[in-house]
Image: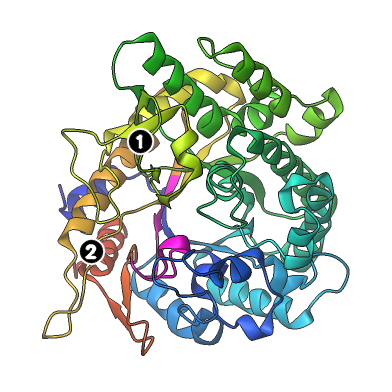
Amino acid sequence: MTDPRELAARQPANFVLGAATAALQIEGGADLRGRCGWDEFAEQPGRIIDGSTPALTCDHFHRSEEDLELMSGAGLDGYRFSISWPRVQPEGSGRVSSEGLDFYDRLVDRLIERGIRPMATLYHWDTPIPLEQQGGWKVRSTAERFGEYAAIVGERLGDRVADWVSINEAATVVLNGYGLGVHSPGEEQLFRAGAVARNMVLGHGYAVQALRSVPVAGRIGVTNTHTPVSPATDSKKDKAMAGLLDFVHNRLFADPVLLGRSPEVPRGLPLPMRLMLKSVSRMSRKDLELVSQPLDFYGLNYYFPSLVAAGADPTGMSPDGESEAAKDLPFRLLDWPDLPQTDFGWPIAPDGLRQISQQMAERYGTRLPPVVITEGGASFNDAPSPDGSVNDDDRVAYLAAHIGVAADLANGAIPGFELEGYYVWTLLDNWEWAAGFSQRFGLVHVDFDTLERTPKSSYHWIGDVQRARRGKTEV
């Protein structure tokens, strides 16, 4: 179902259809900000699949007006961007860069002038190097510095930003950055990395406290990636390992934030593992009060469901790259036999969005605030045709199916789950972390040699959906 008029008719009038980006993946301008952990990680041989770095990426820092015109051309309701911590605070504390804050100040103003709702994410993985060298998210002081940074940004932009996201995908930072080593800072601590989640959830708490103390006028939330987890078989071992991934991926961060308590360690795991998980996830009552301050919305990033079997993958593969540490995991992810895949090898399962929404509604009940799908999208390695156009029908089909599920959710398909919008990942083809420039998620094709932007057919399709929603006739 890719008919723009049909999809438009299913969306509530106040549904926000937008696009999302992250500062490090598109901004470039590395010489005008402080260094972050990803800068050093990318300079280590073999870390990034194509040897690229985030120094230039899409050069959005110098081409933001062009990119704002692209947003307007697609008729986006909202734009989710992230603020680079080292661009605002090059050392991660103390000195503030007025030039860095000025960039985001102008960006927010330009969005509002175009009628596009600004959603600002305070942390999308770019930890300033001085903090990384002092322990990064392994130490509580990083969480405290994050709260101070949140206050600085809130004081400057808090009168105009509509929605604030404290931290993006703490689960991914814990798993990929500190557990498997496929992302910055490249540490392979496996389940000992759970302590990192505790400090990241504290960082969220300090940020919420800071934003409310400013106070900012907009709403405050957080974003995490969630995946519905299924065991490969009905065996006790497969079920236990599915419970383990659900704990680490879905509950380690969300339970303290939404329920105000440490997550319950799943049953069926070996006692030493249960004790270790309980130890790294336990928080004091005072800290739980800090991190469970009521939120105005909850950001849900959904990409795919997970099929889990007991026993490590001898190749050490993970959804984001190969890892030696993954060979020591007590479980492995399997391919879904009946599901198509993106060019990144991720399964395509629109109904998984409905499934995880149902699980969240059941788990969190009245503690679950309104939800926004803050990321959803697919990588297809499309390229310009001889006539210069970029046809990405696979992405159109992907987005139509997923936004269709989102429309059902926004219309109350699941009692207790209030969905407000869907942000497509992503506006521009970008620097996709450890995958470098090898994966393209954008609505707009970027030639990484010339930086020329070419809207894809998915971009034009989104525009048609938006024009149909607004009753315009040129669809």
Look at the image and say whether residue 328 sits in the magenta stretch.
no
**Picture quarter containing residue 127?**
bottom right
- In the picture shown, does residue 359 fall above or below 419? above
**Residue 385 in sight from this viewpoint:** yes
Residue carrying label 2: 461
Of 32 and 120, which appears nearest the observer? 32
**Secondary structure type for disc 2:** helix
**Residue 293 in sight from this viewpoint:** no
Q: What amino acid does circle 2 point to?
A: Trp
**Secondary structure type for disc 1:** helix
Of 44 and 243, which appears nearest the observer? 44
Indicate the quadrant containing the C terminus: top left, top right, bottom left or bottom right: bottom left
Of 16 and 50, which appears nearest the observer? 50
Q: Residues within 10 Å of mark 2 (few under 14, many from 20)?
A: many
> Which residues, given as a range, are shown in magenta?
421-438
Q: Percent position (x, y) of residue 264?
A: 62, 16
Q: Is residue 205 left or right of residue 63?
A: right
Look at the image and say whether residue 424 sits in the magenta stretch.
yes
Q: What amino acid does circle 1 point to?
A: Leu
Q: Is residue 379 left or right of residue 289?
A: left
Q: Percent position (x, y) of residue 215?
A: 81, 53
Q: Percent position (x, y) of residue 162?
A: 61, 57
Q: Percent position (x, y) of residue 44?
A: 55, 69
Q: Residue 353, labelled with which disc?
A: 1
The residue lying furthest to the bottom in this view is 450
Query: In the rendered picture of this protein, how many numbered marks are placed on residues?
Result: 2
